[in-house]
Amino acid sequence: MSHFTKYRLAWVLLFFSMAKLSAQERLPVFLEMEGGVERFGDASLRSVFPGGMNLTLGPAFSLADQGRLRLRPQAGFKLFFNELDEWTTEHLRFIRLGGQASYDAFYIGQTTFFPFFAIDFNWVANYDAESEATGDSENVSFSDNYLKGWGFSQVAGLRIQYQEFYLKVGYEFFNPRLKATNDVIDGDRVDGYITPSSRRFNFNTINFSLGATVRL
């Protein structure tokens, strides 16, 4: 059984377990969606990818301590861009599936403060997108992946919520090993470079997100 299949089955089991527990306790369930910006902590990566975007969606189940603990199965993606020229843009893409735990620690007026911690399984790919103008339209084609890999990331931070809207600030730890394709290795060898077949990357990031929550 592949890593993807195992993790997907675990995610589905977690989702239904929390839904059943929340229903038994008659506690509320919320739909949460958030999007924001990302910035690498590593200076060499920032020089290539100055910033990125993120989007995450998932149902949040209120559980222990009068519903102050929330568990959220979640899915989302992150995308970083590097404009190589007028027609070509390098992409670094993260597709993710995981879960988040947050706790209603305290509030000031109508503003609630939630420390949170999340773990996600990430599929990473590095590729180019090329644009070509054809008449009044523009066609975009994508190259094969130059680098690809997977791994677990961890995020810790604080969510500040006012009514149904919230701001999140977090720091993510993620250091996967990515593999180069044979085409990249062979092409670099022709140009006189020796490229290792795999390499570990420091993808630690600080992220800022704005979100909204709706009670189901």
Image (cartoon, grey):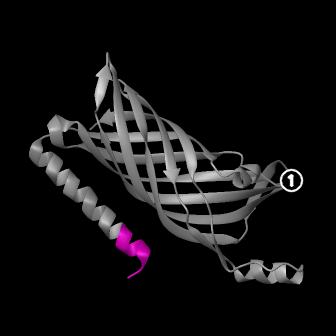
Q: Quadrant of residue 62?
A: top left
Give the residue type that dot 1 points to. Asp
Quadrant (top left/top right/bottom left/bottom right) for the N terminus: bottom left
Residue at x-position 40% and y-position 29%: 160
Tell me which segment is drawn in magenta: 1-7
Residue at image coords 31%, 67%? 10
Q: Is residue 71 left or right of residue 199?
A: left
On the image, the x and y values in percent for residue 113 come to 35, 29
Under circle 1, the secondary element is: loop
Q: Which residue is mark 1?
A: 85
**Camera-side residue: 128 or 173?**
173
Residue 78 magenta-highlighted: no
Q: Residue at x 42, y 30 (%)?
A: 166
| Residue 11 showing in the rendered view | yes
Question: Residue extending furthest right?
Answer: 191
Residue 6 among those drawn in magenta: yes
Which residue corresponds to the image point at 34% horizontal and 34% vertical from the top-left?
A: 114
Secondary structure mostly seen in the magenta stretch: helix
User: Residue 30, percent across and down?
Assistant: 29, 39
Q: Residues within 10 Å of mark 1 (few under 14, many from 20)?
A: few
Residue 145 appearing in the image: no
Residue found farthest to the top: 109
In the rendering, at what x and y percent does residue 171 appear?
Answer: 51, 45
Q: Position of residue 51 (x, y in %)?
A: 67, 45
Quadrant the C terminus occupies? top left
